[in-house]
Image (cartoon, rainbow, N blue to C red):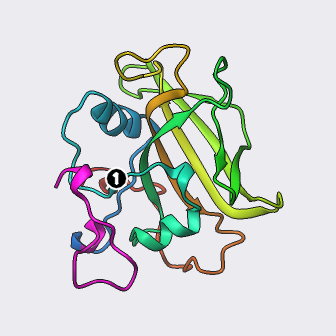
């Protein structure tokens, strides 16, 4: 099923469709590396190639609070993957607009880190780390990794006068386990697990 045809699946509405993880054998997890997310998923979307049949959602995350996205899209592994555009904060600048309506904003917590392809050593993009703050500037438990390619991947006809900064970036959202009481202790991780990276 193509990403654009994926329906919104609320929690508890299990009769309509299954999350891809529900169809895996016990012990298998979807745990791509940073470079794999850029090379095989973000680049595939930018180049209009078919994405694997996984739960990558095309959503402008800056139109929705993280809690709203989590309620509408199922994730058995408590990680949400989104393909989203980015707008400029200022028309003449390259700073992303991180505001989420009147609800709050995403704030960077670390400097951008280069991402390298483990096989070739080539830099394939960057990874940013962000945290979500409510409009009263209180920090929430929501965190996000944002993956970008080396180029702006703007649509044809866009220029420096365009409000759009990127056509597509890939975002992975999750809750801080140290603060979240909803995360089960036996949920399993991908550490030291090689077979889980290829499903």
The residue at 66%/74% (across/down) is: 180
Secondary structure found at label 1: strand
Report x, y in % for residue 69: 49, 64
57 relative position to 16: left or right: right
Report x, y in % for residue 86: 52, 36
Quadrant of the snapshot with the N terminus: bottom left
The residue at 18%/40% (across/down) is: 50
Q: Is residue 180 above or below residue 124?
A: below
The residue at 36%/36% (across/down) is: 42
Q: Is residue 115 visible?
A: no
- Whether 9 is among the magenta residues is yes
Q: Is residue 39 above or below residue 196?
A: above
Report x, y in % for residue 72: 42, 70
Report x, y in % for residue 91: 64, 22
Q: Is residue 184 visible?
A: yes
Q: Is residue 7 above or below residue 48?
A: below
- Whether 161 is among the magenta residues is no
The residue at 29%/75% (across/down) is: 26
Quadrant of the snapshot with the C terminus: bottom left
| Number of other residues with Cα within 10 Å of mark 1, as a class: few under 14, some 14 to 19, many 20 or more | many
Q: What span is colored magenta in the figure?
A: 1-22
Image-quadrant location for residue 73? bottom left
9 relative position to 52: left or right: right
Q: How many marks?
A: 1
**Who is closer to the viewer here, 9 or 120?**
9
* Residue occupied by mark 1: 56
**Main SS category, magenta section:** loop
**Who is closer to the viewer here, 76 or 82?**
82
């Amino acid at each position: 099923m193509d990403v654009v045809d994926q329906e919104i699946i609320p929690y508890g509405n299990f009769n309509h469709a299954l999350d891809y993880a529900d169809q895996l054998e016990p012990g298998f997890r979807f745990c791509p590396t940073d470079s794999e997310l850029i090379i095989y998923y973000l680049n595939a979307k930018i180049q209009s190639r078919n994405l694997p049949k996984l739960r990558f959602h095309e959503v402008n995350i800056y139109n929705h609070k993280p809690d709203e996205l989590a309620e509408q899209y199922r994730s058995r592994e408590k990680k949400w993957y989104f393909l989203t555009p980015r707008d400029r904060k200022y028309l003449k600048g390259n700073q992303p607009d991180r505001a989420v309506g009147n609800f709050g904003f995403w704030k960077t917590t670390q400097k951008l880190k280069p991402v390298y392809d483990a096989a070739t050593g080539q830099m394939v993009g960057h990874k940013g780390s962000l945290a979500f703050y409510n409009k009263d500037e209180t920090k929430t438990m929501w965190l996000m990794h944002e993956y970008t390619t080396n180029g702006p991947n703007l649509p044809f006809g866009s220029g420096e006068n365009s409000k759009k900064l990127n056509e597509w970036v890939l975002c992975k959202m999750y809750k801080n386990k140290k603060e979240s009481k909803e995360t089960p202790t036996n949920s399993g991780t991908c550490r030291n697990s090689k077979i889980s990276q290829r499903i």
